[in-house]
Image: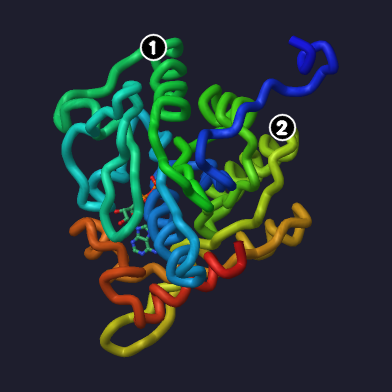
Amino acid sequence: RQQMARGLPKQKPITGVKQVIVVASGKGGVGKSTTAVNLALGLTAVNPSKSVGVLDADVHGPSIPKLMNLKGNPELTDNNLMIPLTNYGIPCMSMGFLVDDAAPIVWRGLMVMSAIEKLLRQVNWGSLDYLVVDMPPGTGDVQLSISQNIPVAGAVIVSTPQDIALLDARRGAEMFKKVNVPVLGLVQNMSVFQCPNCHHQTHIFGSDGARRLAETLGVHFLGDIPLHLNIREMSDRGQPVVVSSPDSPEAEAYKKVAAAV
Ligand code: ADP
């Protein structure tokens, strides 16, 4: 109450978590979740002494269970906190662990908020240096409520170089600025496709749009991730490239982003 009287936001840290990094995008399908898991794995690859977890806040379309090859219901601690499921050394929590795979997740605004509240406050993370949060796409209530309820160290915004994606990425960046969350920078995903046969490079979604947007917004450009078959195939198998092909150029691209964050 005193805090509110002073006009400060009522932010409360997540127990055990030092820094929260949110991964956001304006649009769906631009590779936000794929970037979030490879960023989390990249953070441990470039800082082996740091512990990293992943929270899937995309309650409507949770992707983390599939991307991290995790399934099942979390066990509870004695005081009823959920214990994250772990793969590749990364503890993860997702609505996907709590609901049926095939059942549509149809819920109203208030239920979404209580689901987010549960994911933010009722998980036993142990001790983490970084919690990477895979946000839902867009700039709605969930993004706002996360940004206002927990101290967020920074936001990483993922976009393709396409104008229509950039427009929404810009809205995302402006939203974080408005709620005083530092924008750590932009990641340009699907920047270039290299033909595996002739090695010709094609900029399918345009070139360098996200780099230019970063300049316009005065935020860092964190790097390019190529459009690569291996990224799609390995993601679908639940074996993100940073762990399944750690020495590949595409894994290096994610590690470069992790080092820049
Ligand atoms: P979002 O979280 O933004 O909805 P996803 O991470 O689920 O997007 O990615 C959408 C689709 O694109 C997935 O099938 C994913 O495997 C694929 N994908 C993402 N990034 C790349 C990339 N750099 N190269 C190839 N496929 C990618």
Q: Quadrant of the C terminus?
A: bottom right
* Color encoding of the figure: rainbow
Please rate how many residues cluster around mark 2, counting C-alpha atoms within 10 Å: few if below 14, some from 14 to 19, many from 20: few
Answer with mark 1 or mark 2, whichever residue precedes in sequence: 1
Residue 136 location in percent, x, y? 45, 36
Residue 157 location in percent, x, y? 57, 50
Q: Where is residue 41, by image quadrant? A: bottom left
Q: Which residue is mark 1?
A: 108
Q: Residue at x 48, y 61 (%)?
A: 189
Residue 32 location in percent, x, y? 44, 50
Instruction: Determine whether the residue tagged by mark 1 lies in a helix, strand or loop.
Output: loop
Please rate how many residues cluster around mark 1, counting C-alpha atoms within 10 Å: few if below 14, some from 14 to 19, many from 20: few
Instruction: Determine whether the residue tagged by mark 2 lies in a helix, strand or loop.
Output: loop
Looking at the image, is 98 positioned above or below residue 195?
above
Q: Is residue 13 left or right of residue 82?
A: right
User: What label sits on residue 132 in the rendered view?
Assistant: none
Q: Residue at x 31, y 40 (%)?
A: 84
Q: Amino acid at mark 2?
A: Val
Q: Amino acid at mark 1?
A: Arg
Q: Quadrant of the N terminus?
A: top right
Quarter holding ligand 1? bottom left
Q: How many marks?
A: 2
Q: Of the residues tagged 1 and 2, which is closer to the observer?
A: 2
User: What label sits on residue 179 in the rendered view?
Assistant: 2
Q: Is residue 14 left or right of residue 29?
A: right
